[in-house]
Amino acid sequence: MKQFITILRFELNSYFKNKIFVGITIFLMAAIAVVMFFPRFSGTGDNADGEPSEISDQGVMIIASEDLSGVQAVGDAFAAAFPGYEVRVVSEGVETVKESVVSGEAQCAFFLTGPTSYTYFVNNLSMYDTNTAIADELLLNIYRINAMTQGGLSAEEASGIMSAVMEHEIQSLGKDQMQNFFYTYIMIFALYMVILLYGQMVATNVATEKSSRAMELLITSAKPTSMMFGKVIASCLAGLIQLIAVFGSAFLFFNINRGYWEGNYIVESIFDMPLELLIYMLIFFILGFFIYAFMYGAIGSTASKLEDINTSVMPITIIFIVAFFVVIFSMTSGNIDNTAMLVCSYIPFTSPMAMFTRIAMSSVPFYEIIISIAILIVSVLGIGVLSAKIYRVGVLLYGTPPKLSAIIKAIKKA
């Protein structure tokens, strides 16, 4: 145990003294701070008291037609539907209307060419411009009301018919996939990046020690299991601390500026993760990280040169990438409980992402979660012990990367 603690402390200190590790952490925290404070300084969103900010004047909107008969009523309807604009009704030709928009006199213009047709003029069309969608519904309602009044209905009756709305209520008896989608995706992507990044770092550190012959000295004074578990747990703690720092700062900055983010469904859903789901995320993150970090460390010990690392760990990386894409495709398709996800929920190499996604976006029986976690724990211990044996044998293997059969024979003889 003393050897393990010494190695763990040494490896952790090496992470915290690494300028790149510290720099990336600080950079991510600063970037998140800029994003979270942006609405406060840009004047968008709500104010600090949680009260909606005043709607800023978006400019002048022109409603134009060569024939003004009935257009004034359209203008009144547009003024009610677009409170952020100063709506002006004019009788002008197309070229005059276009000139008003180009010169900046008007932000946009609707040139009515018939009861159900118009041309929309805007200088620079934004991807968030929804004016035509509102205008389509508005003009269509006016046309229908006019048609019904000409057919004998009173204006009040026609308006009552057109203003009828369909009421509905949605009751989700399980999980709301849309509500949970965004933070599930972020957590899966974070798990993907951290495992690949820190797993590669474990393999690189082991290969560096071997190439410098330092490992041969270490292996004579410490048990392989202590060295392997110390390195892997240290990298896991470093990754976990980095994640806590990044996501913790994001949560803190969001709550400081919560009033400015009200109404933003995506951002609010990300920070409204249930505590139960957060606990499951930590469990699957830690167990999944251990499995891949042990394998990366074992493979790193068999490489004689740093140049061999990328080639050696490629099979492990491919397995993890396949698991990631199975989860992402299932999330985007909306069918979380498909056969592939059910199978992947019990395979140790894929269950950290697959089972967590099912828990977040579906209703999973508790016994299935327990079985998946139990398989993961047993797999972590088994792979950890096996990786330590490979680590001990790998110290003595130099030259070309050994084949799997050679490693197995060496383990049996050890």
Image (cartoon, rainbow, N blue to C red):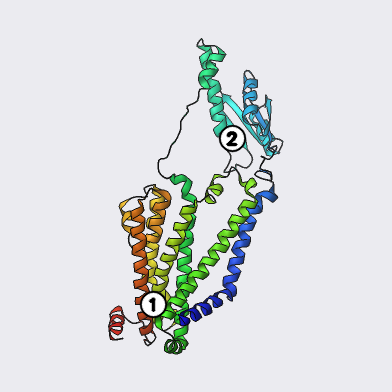
**What residue is drawn where x is 29% and y is 80%?**
408
Nearer to me, 173 or 71: 173
Residue where numbered disc 1 is placed: 298
Residue 234 % position (x, y): 49, 74
- In the image, is 249 to the left or to the right of 178? right
| x and y, in percent, of residue 266 in the image | 54, 47
Q: Is residue 22 visible?
A: yes
Look at the picture and state if 18 lies above or below 48. below
Question: Which image quadrant: the C terminus?
Answer: bottom left
Looking at marks 1 and 2 on the same chain, the residue that comes earlier in the sequence is marked by 2
Asked whether the viewer can see residue 65, the reply is no
Which residue does the image show at 39% across and 48% down from the upper left? Answer: 362
User: Percent x, y for residue 392?
Assistant: 37, 84
Reading the image, the residue beneath label 2 is 131
Q: Residues within 10 Å of mark 2 (few under 14, many from 20)?
A: few
Q: Amino acid at mark 2?
A: Asn
Q: Going 63% across and 61% down the picture, which residue do you hit?
A: 30
